[in-house]
Amino acid sequence: MMNRSLLSKYVLPFIQWYALMILLAIVIDYFLHRLQMVYIGRYLGYIGTFTILISFIYSLRKRKIIEAGSPKKLLNLHEYLAWIGSVMILVHAGIHFNALLPWLAILMLLINVASGLVGKFLLKKSSDSLKDRRQSLLQSGMDISDVEKKLFFDSITVDLMKKWRAVHLPITAVLAILVLLHIISIVMYS
């Protein structure tokens, strides 16, 4: 069973970010309806999609397709831009679902955001674990270079992150396919 410290440090922020995303989308959609500016939601779909696409600069950097930028800063940028883009897309969707494809795309978006937040949780947890382990090894009297060598091959951290990526990447791919199908269907039938 997870203790309160782990719960408040890792799980609660996940729930708060996820709930805030949904609540913010509902509030924005509500005010757009109140102000009779529902048409803005349509454009938020384009802007939100573009915002999420910009967030993939992190993926390009991680795969060494581009060399510029700090991976840590780009990861933070990825997290926030993807979250903001998701809010915009949720406002775009509103409650105006009239076909199966938009429902599936929004469901996959919500799953993808949850997956990303879980990845953030795993990264934070593994990073904290690695930091604690480094501290413990240094306190035991191990030489700093030996500590770095030992931690470089820390299989727990690597395995934890690999397991998460094996889930997040296919979810992202399915989301991308659904978005493309949605865009194609809008172009063909409007």
Image: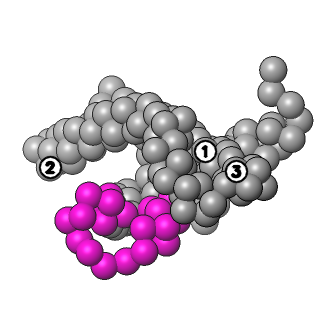
Kindly indicate the quadrant of the structure image that contains residue 24.
bottom right
Residue at x 55%, y 55% (from the top left corner)? 146
Which of 37/50 is in front?
50
Helix or strand or loop: what does disc 1 sit on?
Answer: helix
Location of residue 182 in the rendering, given as x and y in whole percent from the top left corner: 24, 41
Q: Amino acid at mark 2?
A: Val
The numbered mark, 2 or 3, whose residue comes first in the sequence reads 3
The dot on residue 137 is: 3
Q: Is residue 109 visible?
A: yes
Identify the colour scheme used: one colour
Q: Are marks 2 and 1 in contact (CB under 8 Å)?
A: no
Q: Nearer the viewer, mark 2 or mark 1?
A: 1
Residue 79's label in the rendered image is none
Q: Give SS at disc 3.
A: helix
Residue under numbered circle 1: 126
Q: Residue at x 27, y 39 (%)?
A: 173
Residue at which label 2 appears: 187
